[in-house]
Image: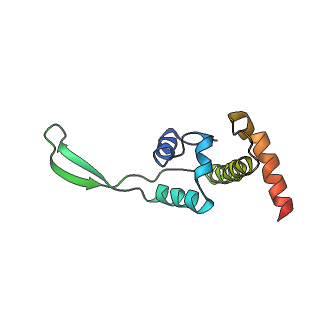
Amino acid sequence: MGLLERSFGQLKKEGIAVSEDLKEFTKDGLKAVFYNFHKPANVTVYSNPDAKIESSLQEQKPFQVSVKSNMRLLVALDAAKYYRKTNRELTPSTMRCKVLNRIQGKSRLQK
């Protein structure tokens, strides 16, 4: 998909570690995840980490998710919903780019 390791790790923290996890999300939920990527929460930084004294809040850099990765995740979300609706098993082979491109093409025709 082309996500940076840092962004992929954050996606896991948001609850999307494997394709099966997409079944639990809606499009609005996924868009909220991407919104959180743009402005992550501040983190506490200690001048002396061992003693945990003299803390300050430090801004994090935004997580990077390309438009293409964003679009692919939204298509994967549609695919996960389709597989759930039709009681089909969701596996890595059913979430390959070739399959997702076919699903994306069909959804364009239906609009």
Quadrant housing residue 27? bottom right
Camera-nearest residue between 80 and 52: 80
**Can residue 2 be seen in the rendering of this structure?**
no
Camera-nearest residue between 86 and 35: 86
Give residue 20's position: percent from left, percent from top. 62, 42
Is 111 placed above or below 40 here? below
Q: Residue at x 73, y 46 (%)?
A: 83
Residue placed farthest to the right in the image?
109
Is 81 placed above or below 31 here? above
Residue 67 left/right relative to 38:
right
Residue 4 left/right relative to 91:
left
Q: How is the image coloured?
A: rainbow
Residue 100 left/right relative to 8:
right
Give residue 78's position: percent from left, percent from top. 71, 53
Camera-nearest residue between 22 and 89: 89
Q: Residue at x 55, y 59 (%)?
A: 29
Q: Residue at x 47, y 46 (%)?
A: 10
Give residue 81's position: percent from left, percent from top. 69, 52
Residue placed farthest to the front in the image?
87
Give residue 43's position: percent from left, percent from top. 31, 51
Q: Residue at x 68, y 48 (%)?
A: 80
**Can residue 64 be seen in the rendering of this structure?**
yes
Q: How many marks?
A: 0
Quadrant housing residue 99? top right
Is 95 placed above or below 43 here? above
Quarter of the C terminus within the rendering: bottom right
Quarter of the N terminus within the rendering: top right
